[in-house]
Image (cartoon, helix red, strand yellow):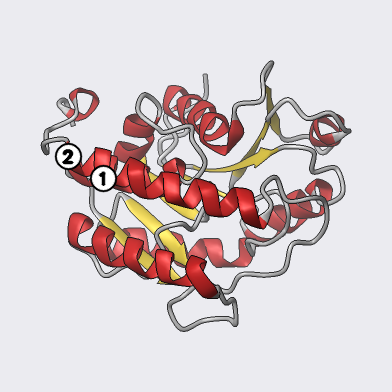
Amino acid sequence: MPDRSDALLVIIPAWNEEATLAAVIAETRAAVPAADILVVNDCSRDATSRLAHAAGVFVLDLALNLGVGGAMRAGYKYAGRLGYAHTVQLDADGQHDPAEIPHLLAAATAEAADIVIGARFAGKGDYEARGPRYWSMKVLAKVLSRVTRAKLTDTTSGFKLCGARAIALFGVDYPAEYLGDTVEALVIAARAGLKVTQVPVAMRPRAGGTPSHGPLKSALFLARAFFALLIALSRPARRHPVLEAS
């Protein structure tokens, strides 16, 4: 098994993303040519898996559809077993710009951070959220800024870098529920003593395919995320067993 202790693994969870995946892989290779790429195929019904294999990247084909959280936990387990120094979660729909990855890496080094969030509402780009979703995200950001002791503006971003300690933690303790993989994961990280920060990034329009959650379903899951946040906050802070040796 090769030593990957100084390497970056870009994890791309993908569910029915045949329209965009090949372009995302090519763009990622151009932006971070030294990085390895892992596509976690979340039981797609289209050509996602075939395109990933054809592109020559690492592929995990899940037997069941687990959602983004479950796919990312599988990715973190993979990264942990091979000893990667960092991972970056990258959406398969083209919304995340791989050219931003070096900025996440630089922030992790400069601030000795375990988790670096690519934040959409931090002064870069023109991405907007409106109505109840906007105010919900504002409240989540305010609460989680206190929990993590960091100034956060975008706690539901799926574009994030993790260092070795976060990889170890999330390989065994990562929420599978929609938005739990962002909101609740930050609580888990903070309770385990990990350092969280953010850097501004520009979000792009979805390049193709179909979103897995419509507006109504997203609103329902957002309410569920608040419930999950309250449950997570009710747990006492503790040192997670997987990090005891670190």
Badge 2 crowding class, 10 Å Cα cut-off, few under 14, some 14 to 19, many 20 or more, is few
Q: Where's residue 105, x and y in %?
A: 43, 59
**Residue at (53, 61) in percent of width and height:** 101
Is residue 204 placed above or below 117 in the rendered structure?
below
Residue 92 visible in the picture: yes
The residue type indicated by label 1 comes to: Leu
Q: Quadrant of the C terminus?
A: top left
Which image quarter: residue 200? bottom left
The residue that disc 1 covers is: 230
Q: Where's residue 217, x and y in %?
A: 61, 48
Extreme residue in the top direction: 63
Which image quarter: residue 197? bottom left
Q: Where's residue 68, x and y in %?
A: 57, 38
Between 178 and 71, which is closer to the camera in this rendering? 178
SS of the residue under disc 1: helix
Is residue 108 placed above or below 8 in the rendered structure?
below
Residue 34 visible in the picture: no
Q: Where's residue 203, x and y in %?
A: 61, 70
The residue that disc 2 covers is: 234
SS of the residue under disc 2: helix
Between 25 and 159, which is closer to the camera in this rendering? 159
Query: Could you give the CA–CA distance between mark 1 and mark 2, rounded to whole angstroms?
Result: 6 Å
**Residue at (13, 32) in percent of width and height:** 239
Q: Is residue 106 left or right of residue 236?
A: right
Q: Are marks 1 and 2 in contact (CB under 8 Å)?
A: yes
